Image (tube, coloured by chain):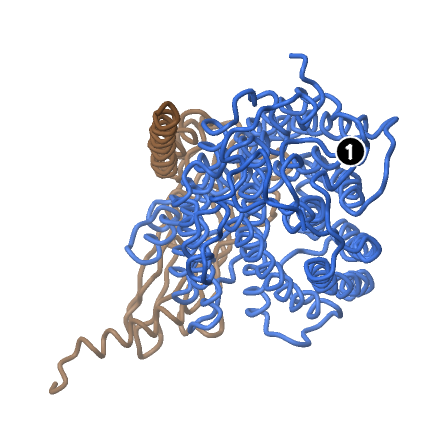
Chain colours: A blue, B brown
Amino acid sequence: MTTHATAHHDDHHDDKPHGFLHRWVYSTNHKDIGTLYLIFSFIMVCIGAAFSGVIRTELMKPGLQFVQPYFFNEMTTMHGLVMIFGAIMPSFVGLANWMIPMMIGAPDMALPRMNNWSFWILPFAFCLLLGTLFVPGGAPAGGWTMYPPLSIQGGDSVAMMVFAIHLMGISSIMGSINIIATILNMRAPGMDLLKMPVFVWSWLITAFLLIAVMPVLAGAVTMLLTDRYFGTSFFNAAGGGDPVMYQHIFWFFGHPEVYIMILPAFGIISEIVPTFSRKPLFGYQAMVYALASIAFLSFIVWGHHMFTVGMPLGGELYFMFATMLIAIPTGVKVFNWVSTMWGGSLTFEAPMLWAIAFIVLFTIGGFSGVMLALVPADFQYQDTYFVVAHFHYVLVTGALFAIIGAIYYWWPKWTGRMYNETWAKVHFWWSAVFVNVLFFPQHFLGLAGMPRRIPDYNVAFADWNFVSTIGAYGMYLTPFMFFFILWHSKKHGAPAAARAWEGAHGLEWTVPSPAPFHTFSTPPVIRDEDLAHGDVSH
Amino acid sequence: MADDRAAGDAIQRNQRLLTRALLVCGAMFLFGFACVPLYRIACEHVFRNKIYNTADSAKGFSVDESRWVTVQFVGNVNSQLDWSFAPEQVTMRVHPGAVNDAWYDAANKAQTAIVGNAVPSIAPSQGSPYFNKIECFCFTEQVLKPGESRRMPVKFVVDPKLPKTIDTLTLSYTFYNNRPATKKLADHTQAAQPPNS
């Protein structure tokens, strides 16, 4: 183990609170809260995967074999809500908590007690949401998008779902404000905004997206609640409302939400790729501006989720062209990652493998996204498995792969131990093969016309559904692999150096591994060679 | 000393940022609700797309007196409904763009009050978008007491943009028993009667 005495912190700060309650429940330490977020999202990934297990098992063969159609609908709805709000978003917040203060030379998050709150609200939110499975009438079954009038039928799970979303929203908003305050106010002297790592930039922009759109979602679900229980008619056509208006409000939230789940992944990839290419990131400023443009465009393209509701032709054309515009800054990012690798001395440790898989597979998801943006084509693709394949390519092989890559990348910094590289590679290749067996055939199913959110289907779709389910069963082994690799590393891993990766730059690699409980209690003196990116000329 | 002041400054700046961010959140929450009127304004004024179909949809049609369209009327009753139902006129010759009135007659032959709903259909289907019903008994539930009969109007306009290849349109109604509404009506009538009568 490394010693605790370094230039960057004071020894007397380092004693951790004793006892489980004081250490974890009352925690205001960014590293402990980051760990809590990551553990929480790992549990949620497992629960969400179990829900998808019900879905894929039922879909393995045509006909109804295992579950009732209504329960199937509950599973698709809960799978979406748990994976989005319980798995992907909290794990990014966990990474932000762990890494942002260390990357900008801050002693902790700006508002540590609020940080504690933003985590500890989440378990309550998900108890409410998962509790709906046990109430009369069952869990919400109208899809994660909660379109009325369907979503407000059924039992009192409507109210529980709405309150759960309110709580998740409060948690995300508090987390985001904290991240913004940390990045804007707590940077070490000399850490200019345009010297920050791209991961920090990606989170700054994501946090602004979150505080702008989570309240809109809160408003939309509040209207659902009052429509259901208090006799309002926001979305009730019989009372003068309009159900299509819900879709507009929802997707005004929903599209920025999509980028909330991918921008931090872009940040992670922009940290991993330069490290294992042993080259500075190509086009640092272009990367930052691309992030900002994607974030801006996300606010003005929501209509592409609802081309088939009967909007005016002008609206469809506008949303189509605006959506296709997003391919430009996204293309800039992909080209810059590839250019970073170009001519570098590449090595393929596990984090780099996940990052390269991200670049390739996320780009496939991006291309199917451009296909979906085309109005005439979208009339065919709308609500088919093509859409399902598209968003799983961007969310599983995109967001989730980046998160796994980030955990492998920073794990030595967190624990002071290396993981077993061979098993990590097995984990990677196993995932890379089976995730494609799982999701690639869904493109074919969707193009052939198989609708999403159905428990039974035409026998014509049987073969690819069977293949897809085999892929799913392969993927269900990966959380266990990941868990055992990390467990083994924690117990028996080789000690990690402060700079765990030869090509790693950034302030987080200047502190010992494992990172002491308190880092940068006095602001570090920043040398250019410590910065995460090489472009310090501006 | 200087460190303390710097720390105090940082806390102040963080709190100022917290307040501002919460204001943004509050404003965005209200924006969610402001979407309700904004959406209506956008639909009605920007896209000139009325959210609601209103009775003045006949406005703007000019009567095409050079052209005649024959409208045929059909009335059917679903086997589960003990009513009689037939149009008063079998055909009408109308000018596209003109507002016309047609009448149907319905009578309840059963011993109980029944709620019925009429479902319209236009043949040929290519002509369907051009047949505008301004007023129709099919828009609402019809309640007939035992033995009661009713004369019911249809007010319609044929759109002058009706393709030239179509010179005859058939308006057909089928009346169905609205069972949930009928049952509700029966329950309601029973409950309304005093128990000792």
| Percent x, y of residue A68 | 59, 74
On the question of residue A47 being in view, the answer is yes
What count of labels does the image hold? 1
- Determine crowd level at label 1: few under 14, some 14-19, many 20+ residues with C-alpha closer than 10 A: some
Chain holding disc 1: A
| Percent x, y of residue A119 | 46, 51
Between B42 and A272, the one lying in front of the other is A272
A438 shown above or below A204: below
Q: Secondary structure at mark 1?
A: loop
On-image quarter of the C terminus of chain A: top right
B8 shown above or below B89: above
Query: Is B184 on the left-hand or right-hand side of A130?
Result: left
On the question of residue A310 being in view, the answer is no
Q: Which residue is under mark 1?
A: A503
Residue found at the very far left of the displayed protein: B196
A358 shown above or below A152: above
Q: Amino acid at mark 1?
A: Gly
| Percent x, y of residue A172 | 46, 44
The residue sitting at 27% across, 76% down in the picture is B187
Between B154 and A440, the one lying in front of the other is A440
The residue sitting at 35% across, 38% down in the picture is B33
Query: Is A476 on the left-hand or right-hand side of A525?
Result: right
